[in-house]
Every structure is written in structure tokens, then in C-alpha cells.
Amino acid sequence: MTQTPETIRAPKKRVAILISGRGSNMQALVTAARAPDYPAEIALVISNRPEAPGLAWAKEHGLPTLTLDHQLYENREHFEGQLQSVLEMSKIDLVALAGFMRLMTPGFVERWRGRMLNIHPSLLPLFKGLRTHEQALAAGVRISGCTVHFVSPEMDAGPIIAQAAVPVLPADTPETLAARVLEAEHRLYPQALSLVAQDQISLNADSIAFQRVGSEGINHADALFSPSL
Ligand code: GRF
């Protein structure tokens, strides 16, 4: 068959997902990446905790997995040195943090600048760190949500790729709000990774660059959705 420009697809980006626990966002990315036209493939799942339920799920589903137990390394640099070797050996293009509970050193973050994503369960820059849903309820906001961002040396502060908003209801507890936000996370992360894998969104010197926007490009609305009741 003669290949026209339309039929020639860019090679899929090779993604490593880093987890520490449950791994539901990892599952959402794995599921999305099964679609033949998804622009990324999940080449490796790495957990820094051997007992992470997400790691067991990934093994059961036949994904290439690796445990890098941070406790077995003398310090952060040694742990990250091993991580970097593995990522290079596996020819990884993009790293997706999905509930990965280790801070990265500025050196490692710089190496993966514009190629490492994270998902956070709030509308950043509000409610950084842990217990985001408690923070949202204490602040009395009527809308919360989630954010996918590029990782920067400062925690939960990197350039924002995509956000989804979720209503906060009067009877919400941290648990009910977390469950509603998590559903949005599972929709948002695959969309955001797809945008980055297609180079539709990338990182300039200090800000996000959007490539083709609107009708000529892909639907950015997919990665920017609002509450509906
Ligand atoms: C998610 O809420 C994510 O936003 C945060 O940690 C949680 C991980 O959940 N960074 P899971 O392991 O993906 O289920």
C-alpha cells in the first residue's frame, strides 16, 4: 500500500508510569493506551513500593513492571541514578507520575523537563501537598477538581497542562469529594498525556506552548472540562 501523509503515523511515545500505591490513574492510562490510535504506549510500570496494589495489577495484566524500592538505596541520588538507567535502557520518552510518593531532586527533574507529568487532585495552584480534599472543604470552595502538570523542582507547582473542574456539594466529606475528583482524574490524565505525546502541548523556556488550537488541531476542550450536575 502506498503511504500518504495521512496514513503515516508518528511512532508512539514510550511512557513509564511511576506509582507508589493503588494505581487507579495508571489503570486509566493503560486502558486508554490500548486504543490503536492512542499516541503513547505504556512501556513500563515502576513502583518504589513492592507491596503497591497497582504493581500487582500491572503484573496481572502483563505489563512490564519493575520494583525500585527506595529504602534499598543510600540516598535520593543513588535511587534516581538507578531510575535514570532503567528509563534510558527502556528508551522511555515520557514519564507519568501517578500517585508516586517520592520527591525528585532538582537534577532529576531538570533531566526530564517537559517530559515528566504529574496528576494532582486539586485545581492548582490551590491546595498543594497532601489532604487536598480536606483543604478544599475547609476553604469552602464550591468547585474543586484536578490538574495535570509538568513536574518542576517545586512540588505541585509545574506548568499546567490540563484541568478538570468538579462541583463540591454541601454534604460532601473528604471521601465523597475524593471519589468525584478521582473520576475526573481518570478522564483527564489520558487526555493530557495524549496532548503531550502528540506534541500538541509542550514546554517552552518558562511556559506551556499550545500547538494547533481549535478546529485545525485536536479538541483542547477534552482536557479542560467543567462541572455538570
Ligand atoms: C490521585 O488522587 C492522584 O491525583 C494523586 O495521588 C492519587 C493516586 O491515586 N497524586 P491512584 O494511585 O492513581 O489510584
Image (cartoon, grey):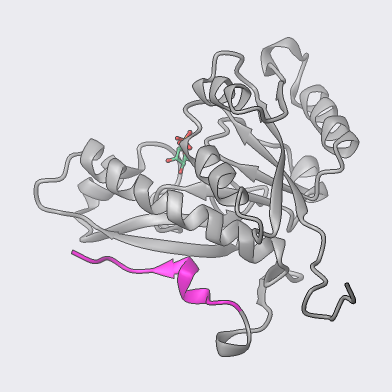
Which image quadrant is residue 141 in?
Answer: bottom left
Residue 3 rendering spot, x and y as whole percentages: 87, 75
Q: Is residue 158 visible?
A: no
Magenta segment includes 109: no
Which image quadrant is residue 90 in?
Answer: top right
Magenta segment includes 223: yes
Tell me which residue sits at (55%, 39%) in the image: 26
Residue 40 relative to residue 33: left or right: right
Residue 131 relative to residue 56: left or right: left
Please state the extent of the stretch shown in magenta in the rendering: 218-229
Residue 185 rendering spot, x and y as whole percentages: 43, 50
Residue 106 relative to residue 176: left or right: right
Q: Considering the image in quadrants, where does the C terminus appear?
A: bottom left
Q: Considering the image in quadrants, where does the N terminus appear?
A: bottom right
Furthest-left residue in this view: 171
Residue 34 rendering spot, x and y as whole percentages: 61, 48
Which image quadrant is residue 10 in?
Answer: bottom right
Residue 207 relative to residue 170: left or right: right
Tell me which residue sits at (83%, 71%) in the image: 8
Q: Is residue 185 visible?
A: yes
Q: Nearer the viewer, residue 201 or 160?
A: 201
Q: Look at the picture and state if 97 lies above or below 216.
A: above
Residue 212 rendering spot, x and y as whole percentages: 66, 83
Furthest-bottom residue in this view: 215
Q: Nearer the viewer, residue 169 or 213?
A: 213
Tell me which residue sits at (47%, 69%) in the image: 222
Furthest-front residue in this view: 1
